[in-house]
Image: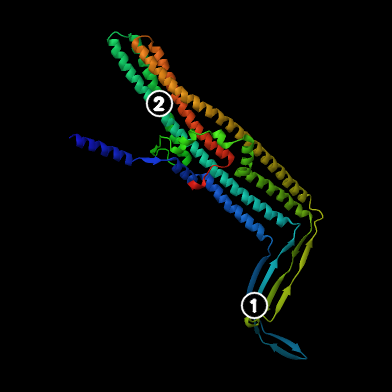
Amino acid sequence: MRFLFSLLIVLIISITSFGQNVLTLDQAINIALKRNTTLQKSINSIKSSESNYKASIGALLPSIGANGTWSWSNSVQAGSNFTYGGLVISVPSSTTQTTTYNASIGANWTLFDGLSNIANISQSKDALESAKMQLENLKQNIVFQTITLYYAVADDQQLLKVQEDNVTWNKKSLETIEERNKLGAVTIADVYQQQVQEGNAELSQIQAENNMETAKSNLLYYLGIDVLTNYTYTDTLTDKEHDILNSSISSKFGDLNDLAQSALANRSDYKSAVLDYEAAKSGVNSAEGAYYPSITTSQTGYDLNANKLSDITKSRTFGLGLSLNIPIFNGFSTDNSVEAAEVAEMNKKIDMDDLKRTIKQNLQQTYLAVLAAEKSLEVNKRNVLSADEALRIKQEEYTLGSATLLDVLTANSTDTSAKTNYINSEFQYIVLNAQMKFYLGELDYKSFE
């Protein structure tokens, strides 16, 4: 009978587990890289940039077109009479049919336009490379945001366990105090005080559960998954995460000045800003090309014409012409175009310099946060050990009558806070490790695609 009961419990647990989906961090990152709508739009924009670059190269080449026509006409002339030398002459009616075949091929070619076409190629190429860099930065950002949101769930899961343990402790403590009150060892006030403490612990657990569910919803929403989907999440740290916690991030990353130089060399968003600035400079060169004369071909082509298709190659015409256009005055439109291009160049330079300062500031702030987190992690770890021991001592003293219930409750509250702070510091430390890699442009995304 006991065997059948155990088997039934195993089956129930298996069925329940089978109905749940486990979502790991790697899976979450992979989903984010596939479903993020901003990323999908950026990929589409790459195609547009590639087309622009191709078109700019094509502007160097002649445009060639072929044309063929066929025409047929049927002309009918009515008969008539006229008098010549006293004689009346009749002209009969006539019908004339005409068929014409024509084939031609022509070309238009801009031979010189002040080198605007060359500048356009450089501009579109830099724009294409910039778009690729922006796409790479977006992927790294998606990975980092997913890591942050996923660890928020893991953090809240651990905090919920702390609150659940706190509720369990308070329930057992209440049972003990009630029994001691029946024996006359403690007053009824201690019972009421512990009942209040147990209620507060339950409220804290409810709040922790709500925080966890909110964190899950935020993650699923970011991944583009229905927030009502039921997933389970890993609630234990991996070996890799333990290695991070047991290592010094600051010593691994090195000197702050070296980090800044490494970030400027690796950050795809900064590379994109540099390319945007270079593209803007090419835009100025392109606009200035309108100040110079342009040379284009004109009336260039090969023409075939005949009344019979078999004679189409007997009548041939080849034409070649050049057209020189010298700009003298165009109502300041070229000046306006150049001025607009120069303003765009200056603005891109400002954007590039602003990003450079932002990168350095982010690195500095994150580096300082890492130093503080390392110290905080160690202090919180010691605090948990001390708080556990202090709670144990106060419980023993309360049992012996040398400490009040308030002393025990205070020690328990301190112990719960210490465990909460330690868990928060652990996940903060792990996220800061990813944040440093992101700001350095070293956060991996290719292994998740």
In percent of the image, x 39 and y 28: which residue is there?
161
Q: Which residue is mark 2?
A: 162
The quadrant of the picture occupied by the N terminus is top left
Relative to 29, is 92 above or below?
A: below
Name of the residue lying farthest toward the left: 1
- Hey, what amino acid is under mark 1? Tyr
Q: Which mark is residue 396?
A: none
In percent of the image, x 59 and y 40: which residue is there?
440
Residue 268 drawn at (x, y percent)? 60, 44
- Hey, what amino acid is under mark 2? Val
Relative to 177, is 381 above or below?
A: below
Q: Is residue 199 left or right of residue 6?
A: right
- Number of numbered discs overlaid on the protein picture: 2
SS state under label 2:
helix
SS state under label 1:
strand
Q: Which mark is residue 101?
A: 1
Q: Are the residues flagged by discs 2 and 1 in contact, CB closer than 8 Å?
A: no
> Quick one: 137 or 90, which is closer to the camera?
137
Is residue 260 visible from the viewing direction of this image? yes
In percent of the image, x 69 and y 69: which residue is there?
106
Residue 403 drawn at (x, y percent)? 38, 10
Q: Nearer the viewer, mark 2 or mark 1?
A: 2
In percent of the image, x 68 and y 43: which residue is there?
348
Q: Earlier in the sequence, mark 2 or mark 1?
A: 1
Relative to 411, is 184 above or below?
A: above
> Quick one: 374 or 353, which is closer to the camera?
374
Residue 91 drawn at (x, y percent)? 69, 87
> Quick one: 335 or 48, which is closer to the camera?
48
Q: Is residue 123 left or right of residue 388?
A: right
Mark 1 neighbour density, 10 Å: few (under 14) some (14–19) many (20 or more): some
